[in-house]
Structure formats: C-alpha cells, structure tokens
Amino acid sequence: MSLEEDVKLCVVSIACTLLLVTIPENLIHVQLDFASKYAPLLVFIFYLFLRDEEKNSPLPWYFLMIYATAGILILKMIDSFSNGTV
C-alpha cells in the first residue's frame, strides 16, 4: 500500500469519527459509548496492523468504515425513537 492510500484512508476514518461524535450529540441528543464513537479509528488501527499481510486494495476498508458509521447512526436513531428520547 502506498502512503497516498494510507492518508486517504486516514482522512475517511477521521471524517467518519467526526460524524459519530457530532451527529448523535447534536441531532439525536444521546451519548455514544467509546467503542461506537471511535469505531472508524479502530478499523484504521486494524488496517495498519494487517496491511502488510493483505496486499489487496484498501477499498474494503473504506466500505467497512462507512458501513460501520452508518450502521451505528441508524441503530442509535432507531433506539432513541423507540425509547421516545427524541
């Protein structure tokens, strides 16, 4: 993997983390736990450890970060709507 791909993946993980930090607190008015809030950064850390073993494209890592972010937000919205906290 090249440095350019690593930087792009890092930017995506930071953007997803910023979404997970701001949207639940400001729009849904709930707090996320540590693992949910920083899940994209944890995926990026796993990528850093596994990138030498996997010589494939970083595209699956992009999808994993984006889908994890979307899944966390959707599940938290469903939970807050079902509890009536919104």
Image (cartoon, grey):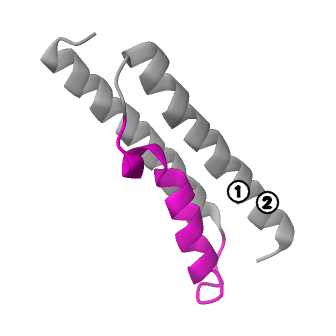
Position of 86 relative to 49 (above/below): above
Pointer 1 and pointer 2: residues touching (CB < 8 Å)?
A: yes
Number of numbered markers: 2
Q: What are the residue bounds of the magenta stretch?
A: 32-57
Residue at the (22%, 13%) spot, across then down: 85
Residue at the (21%, 27%) spot, across then down: 79
Q: Nearer the viewer, residue 53 or 30?
A: 30
Name the disc covering residue 10, or none.
1
Name the image quarter holding the N terminus.
Answer: bottom right
58 on left or right of 79: right
Q: Is residue 46 magenta?
A: yes
Residue at the (69%, 58%) spot, across then down: 9
28 on left or right of 62: left
Q: Is residue 42 magenta?
A: yes
Secondary structure mainly formed by the magenta segment? helix
Q: Residues within 10 Å of mark 2 (few under 14, many from 20)?
A: few
Q: Amino acid at mark 1?
A: Cys
* Mark 1–mark 2 distance (CA, rounded to whole Å): 5 Å
Name the image quarter holding the C terminus.
Answer: top left
Which element is circle 2 on?
helix
Query: Residue at label 2?
Result: 7
Q: Residues within 10 Å of mark 1 (few under 14, many from 20)?
A: some
- Name the spot of residue 70 as percent of width and height, x first: 44, 38
